[in-house]
Image (cartoon, rainbow, N blue to C red):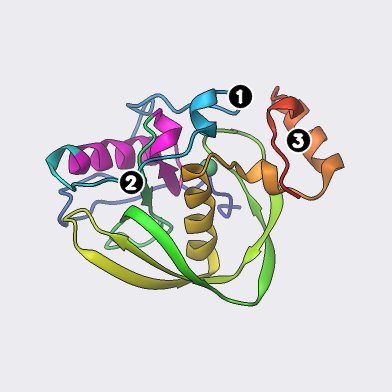
């Protein structure tokens, strides 16, 4: 099923502030995506003080790499840049849907309901495990033009935002997995190492 974070086929094109980015990419991601075990994924990211053309260019490159890798979210640390920048597009079937670019995102409220859902990550390819998270959030951020914005999110979008924001704090979804047996099996199957997980449960 196309419900996994990293297995979502991309279709069509879009227009917007960020320019035209074809969702249908072929070949390898243009940027190298770092994997579980790389130290750069474990650093805290820095706030972006000025949203300028270099940030927009980086956002475009991240979107292209995300689409090429068939992901629905990518955080700057995953390409080795410890800055508070995320790109997200959960509307893979909606040709008119704009991707989200979140700069300096901050969650300002969590809903009280928790849910469990299977996550994956472009930095841990092939590994899919259930993670419990709040099902709704409110957040504030800056968009690609530097404008302050607020939004509410639920469902897959809320989950994806929380997953990507964890990357900004050096946290990976495997750190949040409660079933240690499943975690060991899944990591071993894909050639990853349990020692690279920093469990927070
Ligand atoms: Zn991830």
Q: Name the residue under label 2.
A: 47
User: Neighbour class for label 2 at 10 Å: few (<14), some, many (≥20)?
Assistant: some
Q: Can residue 128 be seen in this view?
A: no
Q: Nearer the viewer, mark 1 or mark 3?
A: 1
Above or below 8: residue 37 = above
The structure residue drawn at horizontal position 23% and vertical position 45%, both measured from the top left corner, is 21
Disc 3/disc 2 C-alpha distance (Å) = 34 Å
Question: Is 144 or 170 nearer to us in this picture?
Answer: 170
Is 16 on the left or on the right of 23, as rendered?
Answer: left
Is 158 on the left or on the right of 185, as rendered?
Answer: left
- The answer to whether mark 1 is within 8 Å of ligand 1 is no
Q: Name the residue under label 1.
A: 37
Q: Position of residue 16 (x, y in %)?
A: 16, 57
Is 69 on the left or on the right of 176, as rendered?
Answer: left
Task: Tell me the SS state at disc 3.
Answer: helix
**Outermost residue toward the bottom?**
112
Kindly check if marks 2 and 1 are in contact, taking CB atoms under 8 A apart as contact.
no
Q: Position of residue 194 (x, y in %)?
A: 75, 29
User: Neighbour class for label 1 at 10 Å: few (<14), some, many (≥20)?
Assistant: some
Disc 2/disc 1 C-alpha distance (Å) = 24 Å
Indicate which disc, 1 or 3, sits on the residue closer to the N terminus: 1
Q: Nearer the viewer, mark 2 or mark 1?
A: 2
Q: Position of residue 96 (x, y in %)?
A: 27, 63
The quadrant in which residue 121 appears is top right
The structure residue drawn at horizontal position 70% and vertical position 22%, both measured from the top left corner, is 191
Is 71 on the left or on the right of 97, as rendered?
Answer: right
Question: Is 189 or 38 nearer to us in this picture?
Answer: 38
Q: Mark 3 points at which residue?
A: 186
Residues drawn in magenta: 55-80
Above or below 129: residue 81 = above
Disc 1/disc 3 C-alpha distance (Å) = 15 Å
């Amino acid at each position: 099923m196309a419900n996994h974070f990293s297995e979502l086929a991309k279709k069509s094109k879009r227009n917007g502030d960020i320019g035209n980015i074809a969702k249908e990419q072929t070949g390898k991601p243009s940027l190298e995506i770092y994997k579980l075990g790389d130290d750069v994924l474990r650093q805290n990211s820095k706030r972006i003080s000025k949203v300028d053309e270099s940030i927009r260019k980086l956002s475009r490159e991240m979107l292209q790499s995300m689409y090429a890798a068939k992901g629905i979210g990518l955080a700057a640390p995953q390409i080795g840049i410890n800055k508070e920048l995320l790109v997200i597009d959960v509307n893979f079937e909606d040709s008119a849907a704009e991707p989200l670019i979140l700069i300096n995102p901050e969650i300002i409220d969590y809903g009280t309901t928790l849910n469990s859902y299977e996550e994956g990550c472009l930095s841990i390819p092939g590994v899919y495990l259930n993670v419990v998270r709040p099902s709704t959030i409110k957040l504030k951020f800056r968009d690609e033009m530097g404008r302050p914005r607020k939004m509410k999110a639920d469902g897959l979008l809320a989950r994806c935002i929380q997953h990507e924001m964890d990357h900004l704090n050096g946290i990976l979804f495997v750190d949040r997995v409660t079933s240690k047996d499943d975690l060991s099996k899944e990591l071993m199957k894909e050639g990853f190492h349990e020692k690279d997980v920093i469990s927070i449960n």
